Image: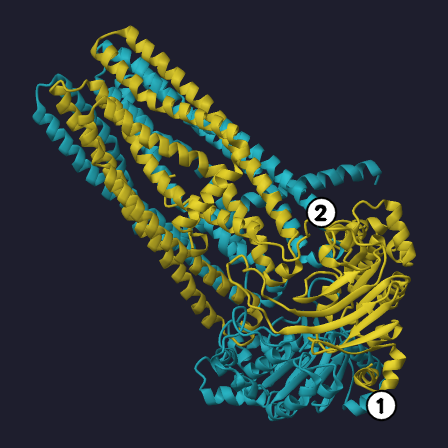
Amino acid sequence: MTAETTEIIETAATKSEADQRTERDLAARTAGWRLMVEAVRPQKWWIVVGVASGFIWTLARLAVPQLAARAVDDGIRGDDLHLVLLLTLAMLAVGVVQALTTGLRRYCAFRIALRTETDLRTRLFAHLQRLHFAFHDEAQTGQLMARANSDLQQINTVVILLPLTAASMLTMIGVLIIMMMKSVVLAVLALGLLPLLNRAATRFSSRITPANLALQEELSGLSGVVEESLSGIRILKGFGAERLQVKRLDDAADGVLKQALRAAKLRAGFMPLIDLLPTLSLVAIIWYGGHLVLDGQLEIGDILAYNLYVLMLIWPLRMVGMLVAQSSRASAAAGRIHEILSTDVAVDDPPHPIPLSDGPGNLLFEGVSFGYGPGRLVLDGLNLSIAGGEAVAIVGATGSGKTTVARLVPRFYDANSGRVLLDGVDVRDLRVSELRDAVGIVFEDTFLFSDSIRRNIAFSDPGASIETIERAARLSGIHTFIQSLPQGYETLIGEHGYSLSGGQRQRIAIARAVLHDPRVLILDDATSAVDPSKEHEIRAALAEVMEGRTTLIIAHRPATIALADRVILLDGGRCIASGTHEELLASNERYREILARSDSTESSSLEGSE
Amino acid sequence: MRGGWVESGPLDDESRIDRAAAGRVVLRLGRMLRPQRSAILRAVFLLIFQTAALLASPLVVRYAVDAGLVGKSGRAINIAAVMYLVLAVTSALLGRSVIWAVSRIGEDFLRSLRARVFRHLINLDLGFFEREKTGRLVARMTSDIDALQELVSQGLVMFVQNALIFVGTLVVMSLLSWQLTLCTIIVVPPVIFASLWFRKRSNTAYLEVRDRVGTNLSTLQEGLEGVRVVQAFGREGGFIERFEETNEAQYDANIATVNIATRYFPFVEFIGVVGLAVVVGAGSYFADRNILEVGTVLAFVLYLNNLFEPIQQLSQLYNTVQSAAAALNKLFGLLDTPNSVPEKPGAIDLPLAGALTVSGVTFAYGGGPPDTDGVSHPLGPIVLADVNITVAAGERVALVGPTGAGKSTLAKLMARFYDPIEGDVSFGGVSLRDATRRSLRERIAVVPQEGFLFAGTVRDNIRVGSPEASDADVDAAVDALGLREHFESFPEGLDTEVRERGSRLSAGEKQLVSLARAALADPTVLVLDEATSNLDPGTELEVERALEALTQGRTVIVVAHRLSTAQRCDRVAVVADGHILEIGTHDDLVSRGDAYAALFAAWTRTE
């Protein structure tokens, strides 16, 4: 193939890639619209009420200027003041209708939008809670938070704007018809300029948005200088170098000033223009309409009514532009939400689950291969058999797959090939909830919830009795500490609560797993943050906990490894040796090497952990 | 706009301000704005003219109706149309100038306010920064000034103009027909009361929304961050239920705001129709009685809008104005915070060299002026009591002792981060209190233990202490410490951006930058606070070597955590319980067999 043809094919490829991207974008937006329609559908009765009241409201609103016009005309002719009184009363009556319907239509619009937003948020959260680990490994919490927060708000706004804008459009059509019936020329003169108002408003917002963004950026640059100066205050003071940051701040403040003035210039240019355009319509009505009155084709009251109509249309016209911009934002937002909702739960119940019968907790890995992504396999044909009630330590260098072994048991991930069996049943044939009931895990990075200690320990069984909770805490060597707290088990922990040390957190996490009372217990580096001097306390307790359960211990401290009956040495995704700690220490060079290495990294990372 | 949206955020207790304080804020603001008074005067004139043009338009309509339509004069209609057009265009042009003028004044003011607050802040004593939370101080410079920015860019013109329009309209209406004005004015109080009610209620409701949104977001975040634990224990259902609760609570709070708006907006709309009905009904009656012409009725209809919108707008802008005033109040509070280690009037430069003498120094933290919240901090326990020590020129002294014994405090006093309560610190015979700030920092520099880096290149960071230094000076300082090779191993050598991804500097490297900084500043006296934690093994040796080079030939006071550092110094002072227990050379103190010997023995065991 010549270089030229390669190039042509490559450009073609990039082009089609770009096409695909816009196609994908379009498809996402379409899916977004479909999602919004589907989410709004349960509100159909509110929609009917809202639309109906919007329609009546429009009619009432159009009627008021007409009544006012007739009253003025009657007043001028002065023949029948009774009629003026009647018309005035009619205006008040119509006013009541207008007020009631406007209340109703607004309430419906906001209610529908809020309901839609709230329902979608619950749906999104529920789906996220069920999505498999691999999804969460890829996703960033901040991004998901944005889906559930700002993206949903975009949808909310468009759902509010839609009916409000529809009623405004209806008003506009009504006004147009009323004016056209009297004089087409006047209607064109009076209303012809108003679309320009829409144009100007849209143009303004498209120009001011980047200006405001640039201003925001300058402001965040400025706050960066402030934050940095305060964080580094000791250095500035130490060298008397305050003037350096003063200069930086001056520069940042100049940047802010420049962008702020740029935005101000735009506002100064557009805002008076946006105010001017409707006034030009009023001028047209006075001038052309005035001459029509002189010709006898129009009443003075009509001039009044037209004035009122033009004033009525100012906001609706601005809103149309808003709706267009908002629709585009909302459909993109809904597309992103749809993408999450349409992600299938990879780890789910099988169609015909086999009930898990009682068993000792035998674990069997048969030729298990697994990789976190395409490419490198972390486990490569692993064969492993662990008898019920046995305590096994899994040891290996970083990346040897020891944590992965533990994660395949409760089906946090599914093996690419091979099988994991619990008491003779492939874990994929079990109901997920039943499987996870039988397996308890203490994670390496301890996550506790912002809640009381009691509820954190009783996480898997919120109804657990206080005796059960205390027993779990005692077994994890944390009961005495909890009791020493002024509020004991009710002490709130987490972001706004009592702050615990790493070791205390780990021990609460162990208590949480103990309370779960699983058949298979997995301790994933669960005592790494526990102070070595205190570790012996929970080691004794752990031995009691492990009694009668199958236990997988992932650890690198010899003291923790010593808890196990047997050590399995992993390397390159396979089991390369198995035996007691002493046996391996004596016979296996690689084992000694790994222990020595982890020992040195540990002692350096120990500083400040508790 | 007329929707359920509130332009300015809800007002919480933080952003409220009482009347007396508001008065003081306004007066002081007036004083600060005095240099700009001619520009302000010009803007006010423009604004008045623009408002006058707006108010004149309905009068033109009145003329068109009375002289043109009723008086059957096509010429009058043409004149009126031209006048209307001229007024509209004039008003637009004036409006443009007004917005520009007010923005210019406001933004310039903000620019100078930012600079002024920051200059004041950054020059305050270190004690101030140790008392105050960094977040709060950042908020002064960001969200507080932003609240003012919002007022300047969005609210100020509208606020003044709406007030002018409202009053102007009432005046013009009364001049046209006091009878019809009396009838019309009855609609004003309900709108005012309704708007006040709405502002108050919706403010409370929006605060509630803000709270519940916060709670809901934390549940959400926790659910996402803890999803692995939730799934491991099969608690998805329980957690979804918990989220549903906070999510529904957010919905309820939102609906509460909708309910408030659902009462307010229809009511205002209704009063609008009532106003129209009154003007038209009473107007027609008065016209029939020949009390007024029909043109006046039309003018009144147009003026009605001028009464309604300002009330609503003003009540909406109230929050913006209130937050801005509260923000200014806080900023003024900061500007009023005095420096507790000020430069004396008539301060003199410290001599170029000399001994650093601490004589009879007693010190306790606290007791300074109240902080920016007005909370005063009483004098704490005595940290140093009657301490005496003299460090000769070129001598290296290590301060050792248990945590909290006062050794860091002593070091800070020696650099005048604080002034002692009793006694004095002097350099070359001049009390630090009498020294100019500039000469003080040129002679005595402090290198803190954490190697904080500012945005910019490695070179910029080395230059922090001496901004005027040339590139060659920087190179020389780096060479003097033998660090050239290390820094040149960075992707772009000394010009590597320190904050960029991929060029993260290790803790040890940060220390190296910090030492190079000190070498470049080239002070006579160096106060070092040694890092407590171990550095990465790779750079530890290099740090030690650089430190050795840096301290060569200087007077050095080092707060030592590792006794190996103390060992290398000329003399060691053991600080405990606010006193200097022992002082002497390392060997003397070890052989004396007292406190230092015990410390040293314990240290050699663990190391």
Looking at the image, residue A149 sits to the left or right of residue B430; the answer is left
The answer, for residue A273, to whether it is visible in the render is: no
Looking at the image, residue A536 sits to the left or right of residue A169; the answer is right
- Badge 1 amino acid: Ala
Question: Is circle 2 on the same chain as circle 1?
Answer: yes
Front position in the image: A389 or B500: B500
Q: Nearer the viewer, mark 2 or mark 1?
A: 2
Snapshot quadrant of residue A15: top right
Q: Quadrant of the N terminus of chain B?
A: top left
Q: Give x and y (percent) for residue B581.
A: 77, 80
Relative to B83, is A136 above or below? below
Relative to B58, is A247 above or below? below
Looking at the image, residue B605 sits to the left or right of residue A362; the answer is right
Snapshot quadrant of residue A163: top left
Local secondary structure at mark 1:
helix
Colour of the chain lettered B: yellow
- Badge 2 amino acid: Arg
Subunit bearing disc 1: A
Q: Which mark is residue A586?
A: 1
Front position in the image: B440 or B281: B440
Which chain's colour is cyan?
Answer: A
The answer, for residue B56, to whether it is visible in the render is: yes
Q: Quadrant of the C terminus of chain B?
A: bottom right
Local secondary structure at mark 2:
helix
Residue named by callout 2: A243
Q: Which mark is residue B184?
A: none
Subunit bearing disc 2: A
